[in-house]
Image (cartoon, rainbow, N blue to C red):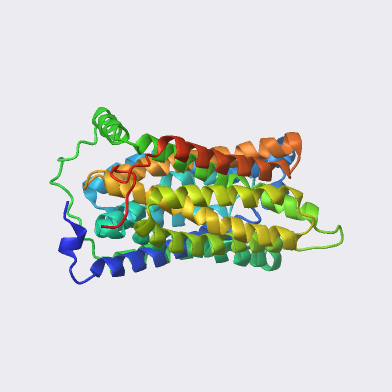
Amino acid sequence: MQDAEASNPSNRWLITIVVIAIAQALGTFGITLIYPFLPIYVQTFPDSPYYGTELLAGLVIAAPPLMGCLTAPFWGRLADQYGRKKLVILATFSSSLIVAMMGFAQAAIVLVVLRALQGLTSGIIAANMALVAGESPRGRIGFALGVLQVGLFGGVAFGPTVGGILAEHFGFQIPFFFTSALLALASILVGFGVRETYVPPPKGAIDLNMITMLRSWRGIVSIQGVKTIYALRFLNGFAQRSLMPIAPLFILALLPASTSGASSYAGLVLTVWSVSMTIGSLVLGWLSDKWGYRNILLGAAFVAMLFYVPQAFVADIGQLLFLQALAGLAAGGVLCAPAAMLARFTNDGDEGATYGLDASVTSLAHGVGPLSASLVAAAFGLRAAFGAVALLYMAVFLVGIQFLPKSKHSRLQLSST
């Protein structure tokens, strides 16, 4: 693989990052349109009484990441073989078709199955991260991935609010078709706007045999510190998605009985959290290149833990919005710092496989998190889920202190050079 810094003296890498970030914003804006009302919408189908409210809410959120956990590593490996840009386009357009089909679902179980099929296209984020990491100078990885997170959570920031409004005024089906169109637009933008400098190896140079791929993944995981980073990514992903199925139900409980518009309020809460995480990812990603990834990670995890604890005791939506904003700022650092570590100390040319594994780990967390939070809420009440998220960020802090080396000479104590 080429050195991005040497092959892009004109800072073409910045253009690539911006285009990918915009495309990712479009995609996530569309996908998150449906998040605020999914737990409510799935209960409107005739077969919903057979499954239960909390279980359906967890399944409809968790199905794509659970399926993506199985397929993401293969997307990453294919990206190394055939080019990251091609895989971004393929995954995005495929997701567009599947989401369009969701608008025609007539049963809760059909919607859950289609959501699971959507997980087959989970290579979007992995291929995007591999493309950005491969095209960026090594000393700017934290900043580059921070910008990518701006695209990711910039879309998440506004998608839920718009989705909630669309669902309230035009019904639950329209947001699915709108999302499909946005994903198609994102794939077109990447196709025409990105000039990839990564040159795939000769055909067959990367063996796609299952045994060979397993050996390759084992080699990546065996690098010092990678297992710890993946563990941190799992814990963060678990915490990040745990409240997705709980937030709409919790907001419904906070609202007076005569108040309508739960979907809109749920979208607003997700928007506030996403905007603050976007800002946190960009600022803390930039600072991590200068101050060290370990320092940013530990500080951000500790602060996030502090701001999630009181959310279990809020009395109104205003308090929840304020605390979600503060927690989101800190969570941005927990998100971007480990992702930058992966790029800095794994081998050039392995970005696809590295972030494919990363996507698998985070997809598993995104799938298990909502289901676990649903079970916690069913057993101990909705407020207990916020305490569980605080414990997860405490775990990130403790694992980081225990297993991330302190020495500035270690590969994990990375700073801009």
Residue 144 position, x and y percent, is 34, 61
Q: Is residue 414 visible?
A: yes
263 shown above or below 107: below
Q: In this view, which residue lies farthest toward the right?
A: 258
Front-most of residues 108 and 39: 39
Q: At 80% across and 55% down in the image, what residue appears?
A: 315
Between residue 204 and residue 130, name the one nearer to us: 130
Question: Could you say where residue 99 lies in the image, as x and y percent from the top left?
Answer: 51, 54
Which quarter of the picture shows residue 18? bottom left
Query: How many marks are shown on the rendered structure?
Result: 0
| Vertical placement of residue 105 versus 184, above or below | above
Instruction: Tell me: 109 left or right of 46.
Output: left
For the point 55% across and 63% down, the residue is 276
Q: In the image, is 343 to the left or to the right of 389?
A: left
Q: Position of residue 11 (x, y in %)?
A: 24, 70
The answer to whether residue 284 is left or right of residue 414 is right
Residue at 46 percent of width and 59 percent of height: 281
Q: Is residue 173 visible?
A: no
| Quadrant holding the C terminus | bottom left
Q: Position of residue 349 (x, y in %)?
A: 21, 47
Residue at 70% in and 58% down: 320
The residue sitting at the left extreme is: 202
| 223 to 242, vertically: above or below | above
Q: Residue at the front extreme?
A: 407
Identity of the residue furthest to the bottom in this view: 10
